[in-house]
Image: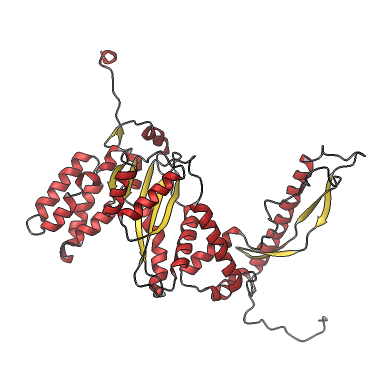
Amino acid sequence: MNEDSTVVRLRQPEAIDDPLTAVLRSGARRLLAQAIESEAATFLALMADQQLEDGRARFVRHGHGPARTVQTGIGPVAVQRVKVRDRGPAGTGERVRFTSAILPRWCRRTRSIDALLPVLYLRGISTGDFQEALAALLGKGAPNLSPSVIARLKGDWQADHERWQQRDLSARRYVYIWADGVYLQARMEPQAECMLVLIGATPEGKKELVGFQVGLRESTQSWRELLVDLKARGLAVAPELATGDGALGFWKALEEVSPTTRHQRCTVHKTVNVLDKLPKCIQPAAKADLREIWTAPDRATAEVATARFAEKYGTKYEKAVACLVKDGDALLTFYDFPAEHWDHLRTSNPIESVFATVRHRTVRTKGALSQDTARLMVFKLVMAAARTWRRLKGENQLPKVIDGVRFKDGIEVTTVDAKDAA
């Protein structure tokens, strides 16, 4: 269009005029190109001593691969892969191929986009609506996110899940574990499916997904199968403490498979169970009284608060008091571990918080997930969430727990020899 033209180009409804986004994409394109070039230069420098018989370098630059568009969090970014040629004589050995760690050979989306897809699905967006939902972020049409691509991606998730289920655990150890069973009502299924989940804390204080499988309710047999499978794949050292709700199936199976592991009942589940046996009018006061037990500075204070609760509510609400008292010891086991870990050990919320999104999806869409899809979506969601899980506070105390150091009311117990004291 020449300068004398009086035609004014109108802004299209679907167009997004955002100079900032354009600048970001341009900058990302330049930075990515520089990083890929630097990666190739580093590879060539490492291979500089590899020479042909006539003294020429064996590895040389060989142009670029075809231009392609990679979907990123700021939209599509055009990139080209650097090619490196191995000029070694044929038949003298295996050819060395340069593969970029920054830009894999068939990469079309960043990993952050792949992690976003199961989250969007669980939020209620169907596979056919992904392109429209992500158009504003990734650009018009959101290429590489068509329904057929999503279907293939689900196949990749299935393969990831199978590999994860068969991984070797002989080099792993978990100081603490959290256990829970989560029920999801899948489409066209007569009953809700129970997903058994185990999360563990490593000696470095990092939380990881340890076990995940579908079981027949929270039965002893289902939990036993999961625990025995983990043990058969190399998880030989039993955890020091297990935290879970009052489901008897898990605790019976744990006693059989890991009899040395101590038990900690989830205080959040116990609070809900006790309040269910009280009238709504007095639940706020009772909840505050229960909180005094869980947050007491030491075991003696917690036991006094428990006795006070029983005296206050026992006359009229025997069932509520019985529900609290029957797990009295298991509710206070955390006092025998470092005080820095109490916030983590008292509750199985690391599992509950992750599955809140899954329940939201199944409620909003009235069970739109099939059993197989629900299993894969839950697995991918948990693995994505694991990257942001909060590490244990006071990880320096974990080696002491492993070594069997005793703690009383959260403080390390030190034994002083009488002669030395004299």
Q: Position of residue 158 (x, y in %)?
A: 53, 61
Foreground of the two, 13 or 280: 280
Q: Residue at x 67, y 53 (%)?
A: 102
Q: Which image quarter is the C terminus in?
A: top left
Residue at the extreme right: 54
Q: Residue at x 64, y 77 (%)?
A: 15
Identify the image quadrant of residue 72. Answer: bottom right
| 107 horizontally vs 178: left or right | right
Callout count: 0
Residue at the extreme left: 315
User: Is residue 387 visible to the viewer in this orientation of the structure?
Assistant: no
Identify the image quadrant of residue 274. Answer: bottom left
User: Is residue 407 visible to the viewer in this orientation of the structure?
Assistant: yes
Q: Residue at x 20, y 60 (%)?
A: 275
Q: Which image quarter is the N terminus in?
A: bottom right
Q: Position of residue 152 (x, y in %)?
A: 59, 67
Q: Position of residue 253 (x, y in %)?
A: 31, 49
Q: Is residue 305 above or below residue 378?
A: above
Q: Residue at x 19, y 46 (%)?
A: 328
| 391 horizontally vs 33: left or right | left
Q: Is residue 280 above or below residue 407?
A: below
Q: Position of residue 145 (x, y in %)?
A: 61, 70
Identify the image quadrant of residue 394. Answer: top left
| 176 horizontally vs 417: left or right | right
